[in-house]
Image (cartoon, rainbow, N blue to C red):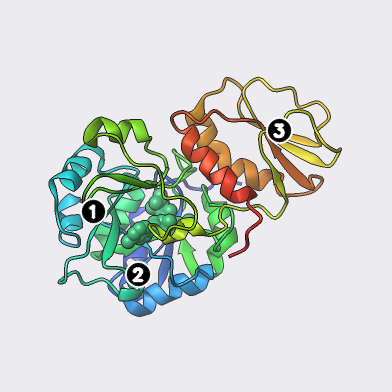
Amino acid sequence: MSAPPTSPDSDAIARAGDALRAGDLVILPTETVYGLAGDATNAAAVARIFAAKDRPRINPLIIHVADADAAFALIAETPGLRALADAFWPGPLTLIGDRRPEARIADLAAAGLATLAVRVPAHPVARAVITAAGRPLAAPSANRSGRITATDAAAAAEELGHAAMTLDGGASALGLESTVVDARGAPALLRPGALTRAAIAAVCGPLSRPAPAGAPASPGQLLRHYAPRRPLRLDAGAPEGEDEGLLSFGPVDPAGYARCVALSPTGDLAQAAAGLFAGLRALDAPPVRRIAVSPIPDRGLGEAINDRLRRAAAAVER
Ligand code: TXA
Ligand code: MG
């Protein structure tokens, strides 16, 4: 058997563009995570995204476009937003801006907010599909709501393949969702992600902390998220039972655990980020019944990794 293609051919891209224009959904690779894309101008297509993911309608979607000009046709430009766009697009940064009245985006995509989240992805397949569709694409992560994010085509198809055609662009290079920043005024970090706080602060100055859980700034952050079916124990040292699987970081001895997935034996946070969700998926299966995770430092990408792990471990159902 030949290996699965990691780059769809031009026929597949053209078919994806046709499907999107017809209101159908497409699972596509981005450099952060896989997305479930639909035509953001088509209310029926956007409704299909919410239905496929079983996503609460209070949680707005990120609109993916080809370049900064296309983004600033949808949101009002400010010097702060332009500086961040110039520094980091295409790439793993989502910017919140005031929605322009003339922006032709289905209301449901914005969940009724007066703002819009926009992003210019870097993955060549995502870029080719946006161009082929000729529309802005609403694309949440390609997982059912609350579940572990998909960072390869097989995981995305397992989550949502019933609802969309899948384009395989290989494993996501970064493995964490984009960082969400509201820089209309004093810049605020709404969701830590694949672009570090320090990198962003170097362009726009210090960012305020993410809103505490319960604050309405970025609705999706209120919910249980990224969660395996098995319970998760953070900052684990020794095993607490023979049915525990370990997601390890650094030079950890896995003796006594039922299984171990090593995120990065050398303690490299970028490597750990890239393997985080696939590691959680791999451990969410027998013989493992509970998942333990080694302590991960909070610096750099560790902020986003720990954000995801804390939400995955939270026992709060949406
Ligand atoms: O890397 C990513 O961002 C991936 C890929 C596919 O691009 N997409 C993604 O989408 O992570 P999703 O839907 O899983 O997360 C979108 C986040 C949610 O936390 C949502 O609440 C927030 O962005 N968001 C969307 N619109 C917003 C707005 N107008 N104001 C504040 N937060 C917003
Ligand atoms: Mg998501």
Residue type at mark 2: give it.
Ala
Q: Position of residue 184 (x, y in %)?
A: 21, 51
Q: Across the whole image, how many numbered discs are drawn on residues?
A: 3
Camera-side residue of 293 and 15 = 293
Q: Residue 193 placed where, x, y %?
A: 42, 42
Give residue 271's position: percent from left, percent from top. Answer: 51, 30
Q: Nearer the viewer, mark 3 or mark 2?
A: 3
**Residue for badge 3:** 236
Which label belongs to residue 66? 1
Left or right of 135 in this view: 34: right
Q: Secondary structure at mark 2?
A: helix
Reading the image, the residue beneath label 2 is 109
Q: Nearer the viewer, residue 120 or 306?
A: 306
Query: What secondary structure is found at the residue carrying circle 1?
Result: loop
Label 2 neighbour load within 10 Å: few <14, some 14-19, many 20+: many
Residue drawn at 60 percent across, 50 percent down: 312
Label 1 to label 2: alpha-carbon separation: 18 Å
User: Which callout, 1 or 3, points at the residue further toward the start of the chain?
Assistant: 1
Residue 264 position by quadrant: top right
